[in-house]
Amino acid sequence: MNSFRFIHLVQFVVLMSLQVLLMRNLVLFETGFCFVYIGFILFLPIEMDKVLLLLLGFVCGFTIDLFYDTSGVHAAATVLMAYLRPSMLKLLTPRDGYEVSDHASLPSMGWRWFLTYGMTLIFVHHFTMFFLELNGFKLIGFTLAKIVASTLFTGTVLLIFQMLFFERRARGFR
């Protein structure tokens, strides 16, 4: 259990550091932003306590808000994503159910499952964050373009991150 906590602590520090030091300045065509820090919430074990999940979502978002000076926008979006995660996992439950050791990751669950799970929650996070940041529905066309571009950018970076750093396990990794 201690190695489990250590691995997730390292993952938290790495993703937060990447976000603050590198991804903050990496923007595609003034539209696509990459928020890799949400990978921490996405990659947690499937059988995670819901209260702990919400608390971790808040800590993640609040940490980024401190560095980005965004007064709670990231915290709100990340908590919403963490709140919706168990429902999304329940919706995507495989026929045989989840195994105790399963993580919500590409190597553990496979391409189709992870793309559905990950892109949906990333979209929810970005939609919430950009509209809270905008403080309404002004400039809806440009904001929707930012949401779509950022979702694709973040999703692609998180897929690459998993392919490089997660061990290849089993179920349907093709």
Image: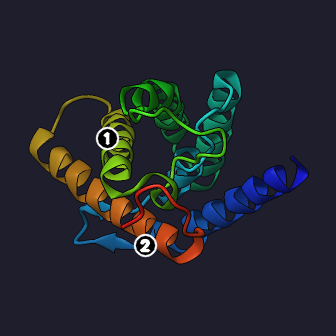
Q: Residues within 10 Å of mark 2 (few under 14, many from 20)?
A: few
Taking the spot 38% from the left edge, 48% from the top edge, the residue there is: 118
Between 120 and 174, the one nearer to me in the picture: 174
Q: Judge whether 166 appears above or below 103 on screen.
A: below
**Residue at the outermost front position:** 96
Q: Is residue 133 left or right of residue 62?
A: left
Of 44 and 15, the residue lying toward us: 44
Look at mark 1 in the image and give the residue it sits on.
Answer: 120
> Residue 24's spot in the image, x, y percent?
48, 66
Circles 1 and 2: CB distance less than 8 Å?
Answer: no
The quarter of the rendered structure image containing the C terminus is bottom left
Residue 60, quarter of the rendered image: top right
Residue closer to the observer: 169 or 79: 169
**Cα–Cα gap, marks 1 and 2:** 17 Å
Which residue is denoted by mark 2 in the rendering?
160
- Residue 132 on image: x %, y %: 37, 33
Q: Position of residue 43 (x, y in %)?
A: 56, 50
Nearer-the-camera pick, 145 or 81: 81
Q: Residues within 10 Å of mark 1 (few under 14, many from 20)?
A: some
- When asked about the image quadrant of residue 33, the answer is bottom left
Query: On the rendered structure, is 32 left or right of 64?
Result: left
Q: Is residue 151 above or below residue 126?
A: below
Is 69 drawn above or below residue 35 in the view shown?
above
Name the residue at 37% across, 60% down: 154
Residue 148 versus residue 123 in the image, above or below: below
Identify the amino acid type marked 1.
Thr
Please provide percent x and percent y for residue 74: 50, 41
- What kind of element bears circle 2? helix
Circle 1 SS class? helix
Q: In the rendered structure, which amino acid carries the disc numbered 2?
A: Ile
149 left or right of 15 in image: left
